[in-house]
Image (cartoon, rainbow, N blue to C red):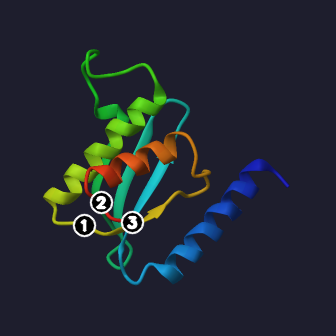
Amino acid sequence: MSEKYQANKRQQRVRSSLKKKSNGRLRLTVFRSNYNIYAQIIDDKLGKTLVSASSLEIETKAEKPNAKKELAVITGKKIAERASAAGIKEVVFDRGRYLYHGRVKALADAAREAGLVF
C-alpha cells in the first residue's frame, strides 16, 4: 500500500471516531505542510468554516520565529482568540492523518492554554 493511501485511511478512521464522540460540537482540524501549519474550526452540520488561522499570517520578521514549533504555538493562540471572539468555547480536536506529536501537539496545547476546551 502506498503512503498516500495509508494516510487517507488513517484520516477516515480518525474522523469516523470523532463523529461518534463529538455530540454535535464543532471540529478543530489541523493541516501541516513542510513549513507552515493551518487550523480551522468547522461546523459539520452547515459544512462551513467558521474560524481559521495559519502560520502564513505572521508577517513581520520580528514576529516570525525560525522554529516550526513556535509557529504552531502562535497559530494555536490565534485560532483560540478568534474562536472566543466568535463565541466558540468547546470543540473536538481533529488531528487528521498526523500523529499527536510535535507541531500538532504544540498547536493543541497553545489553543487549550488560550481558552479552547477539548
Location of mark 1 (residue): 89
Instruction: Identify the residue shown where x is 53% and y is 57%.
Output: 95
Location of mark 3 (residue): 118
Instruction: Identify the residue shown where x is 41% and y is 84%.
Output: 23
Q: Nearer the viewer, residue 46 or 23?
A: 23
Q: Nearer the viewer, residue 9 or 67?
A: 67
- The reply to whether dot 2 and dot 3 touch (C-beta < 8 Å) is yes
Instruction: Identify the residue shown where x is 40% and y is 30%.
Output: 70
Q: Amino acid at mark 2?
A: Leu
Question: Splitting the image into 4 quarters, where does residue 106 fall?
Answer: top left
Q: Spatial distance from mark 1 to mark 3, Cα to Cα?
A: 9 Å
Image check: 5 left or right of 75? right
Q: Is 60 placed above or below 35 here?
A: above
Location of mark 2 (residue): 116
Q: Spatial distance from mark 2 to mark 3, Cα to Cα?
A: 7 Å
Sort mark 1 into few (<14), some (14-19) or many (20+) by Cα contacts within 10 Å. Answer: some
Q: Is 48 placed above or below 99 here?
A: below
- The reply to whether dot 1 and dot 2 touch (C-beta < 8 Å) is yes
Q: Position of residue 75 (x, y in %)?
A: 34, 41
Instruction: Identify the residue shown where x is 67% and y is 59%.
Output: 8
Q: Considering the image in quadrants, where does the N terminus appear?
A: bottom right
Residue farthest to the top, as pictured: 61
Question: Splitting the image into 4 quarters, where does residue 91 fall?
Answer: bottom left
Q: Amino acid at mark 3?
A: Phe
Q: Amino acid at mark 1?
A: Lys
